[in-house]
Image (spheres, rainbow, N blue to C red):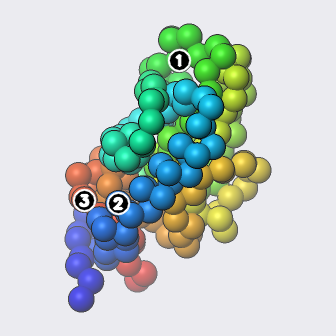
Amino acid sequence: MSKEVVIHGRAFESFLSEEAIRRRIGEMAAMIADDYAERLPLFLPILNGSFVFAADLLRAYPAECELAFVKLSSYRGMRSSGRVETLIGLDLDLSGKDIVIVEDIVDSGRTLSDFLPVLQTARPASVAIASLLVKPDALEFPLEIAYRGFEIPTRFVVGYGLDYDGLGRNLPEIYQLKER
Ligand code: 5GP
Ligand code: MG
């Protein structure tokens, strides 16, 4: 029996359980630690949506790591406005750092493909992307996503940090918009 939640009058059904998410994040952390065995990764979560994923990914990460946050914006409601602004962060020195961008979800890829050149101006040693969710069929901007939690259909999701117009971030699992 799948659970249902209603947010702003729209029905969402449970899609990824807490247990499935936890297990997958453990695998992602192990993969990253393997690849960064000789390096000190600086995890760079993109606020707001990534805060829950980042908290769990870092606690699953079995070696030394650093953390800094950045805030961009490109989403209003259920559609991307397609504008990226760096709102906070990036005032710290990222030069020479091995950065792992921590993203909740990659949809069109526009947010990250706009952000990557901005990030490069800080002269990091390397940049990789870890995204909990990827919508492969929605990808319009070429992006190399080294660490992918789940590839999901092009349907709006909420929970586990992801919101629908400000609500739903506190849901411990991920819900998907029910088709009408
Ligand atoms: P993109 O620029 O790749 O199209 O979108 C990236 C951002 O849009 C994500 O970081 C996230 O904030 C938001 N986004 C994309 N798809 C969804 C979705 O299904 N649900 C929610 N809540 N946000 C989404
Ligand atoms: Mg995001």
Residue 57, image x and y in percent?
40, 46
Mark identifier at residue 179: none
Picture layout, residue 133 above or below residue 55 = below
Q: Quadrant of the C terminus?
A: bottom left
Residue 18 figure quarter: bottom left
Q: Residue at x 53, y 17 (%)?
A: 90
Residue 15 sits above or below residue 87 on the image: below
- How far is disc 1 from disc 2 in space, using C-alphas? 29 Å
Q: Residue furthest front?
A: 38
Mark 1 and 2 residues: CB-CB less than 8 Å, in contact?
no
Label 1 SS: loop
Q: Quick one: label 1, few (<14), some, or many (20+) residues within 10 Å?
A: some
Query: Looking at the image, is mark 1 or mark 2 earlier in the sequence?
Result: 2
Task: Tell which circle, 2 or 3, labels the residue nearer the N-terminal end.
Answer: 2
Q: Position of residue 179 (x, y in %)?
A: 42, 81
Amino acid type, callout 2:
Arg
CA gap between label 3 and label 1 equals 29 Å
> According to the image, label 2 marks what residue?
22
- Kindly state the secondary structure of the residue where label 3 is placed: loop
Q: Position of residue 111 (x, y in %)?
A: 60, 41
Category of crowding for the residue at label 2, using alpha-carbon neighbours closer than 10 angstroms: few (below 14), some (14–19), many (at least 20): some
Residue identified by numbered label 3: 172
Indicate yes or no: mark 1 CB to ligand 2 under 8 Å.
no
Q: Residues within 10 Å of mark 3 (few under 14, many from 20)?
A: some
Q: Earlier in the sequence, mark 3 or mark 1?
A: 1
As drawn, the label of residue 90 is 1
For residue 74, say whether it is visible. no
Q: Quadrant of the N terminus?
A: bottom left
- Kindly identify the amino acid type of the residue bearing the numbered disc 3: Pro
Q: Is residue 13 left or right of residue 93?
A: left
